[in-house]
Image (tube, rainbow, N blue to C red):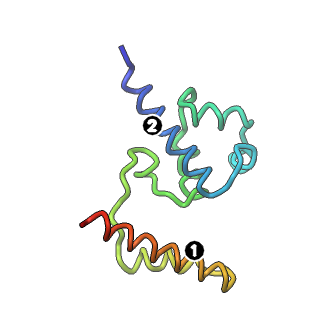
Amino acid sequence: MTDPRQSERNGIGDRLRQAREYVGLSQDEVAIVLGLPRPSVTNMELGARKVEALELGQLAKLYRRTLEYLLTGIEPAPEGPKQLAFLARSLKGLSGKDLEEVARFAEFLKQSSRKGEQ
């Protein structure tokens, strides 16, 4: 019989790994930020170690994800101006070439969602 709490830990671990990889950080880099040994980060991502609330908060900030997403996998609905402010902060400091790449990716996402609706 599967322990539901273990399944939850595995889900959280998967989301932590995916979020870390998405922002391009290594487990070593995350361990340094959290002040933990690297195997602790590995075990969190494998669901073998419980993630403390303070660690989860730090990880949410580091990965730029919400606590709700890390815990449940559910993305909160965008909140208009707040979402735009986040995007503006995310784009700050990018080169012109990088901004063009972001714009191309946004257009790709729009086209992909339109194809999915047809």
- Against 7, residue 21 (above or below) is below
Q: Please state the horizontal and vertical placement of residue 97, each as a whole percent of the image.
A: 67, 82
Q: Please state the horizontal and vertical placement of residue 14, each as a whole percent of the image.
A: 51, 39
- Against 75, residue 100 (above or below) is below
Which residue is at the far bottom? 96
Q: Which residue is mark 1?
A: 90
Image quadrant occupied by the N terminus: top left
Looking at the rendered structure, the secondary structure element under dot 2 is: helix
- Snapshot quadrant of residue 93: bottom right
Q: Please state the horizontal and vertical placement of residue 92, each as a whole percent of the image.
A: 62, 81
Q: What residue type is disc 2 on?
A: Gly
- Against 112, residue 21 (above or below) is above
Q: Please state the horizontal and vertical placement of residue 56, each as a whole percent of the image.
A: 54, 46
At label 1, counting other C-alpha atoms closer than 10 Å, the crowd grade (few under 14, some 14-19, many 20 or more) is: few
Q: Which residue is mark 2?
A: 11
Looking at the rendered structure, the secondary structure element under dot 1 is: helix
Q: What residue type is disc 1 on?
A: Ser
- Residue at 56% x, 76% y: name it: 102
Number of marks present in the image shown: 2
For marks 1 and 2 on the same chain, the one whose residue lies earlier in the sequence: 2
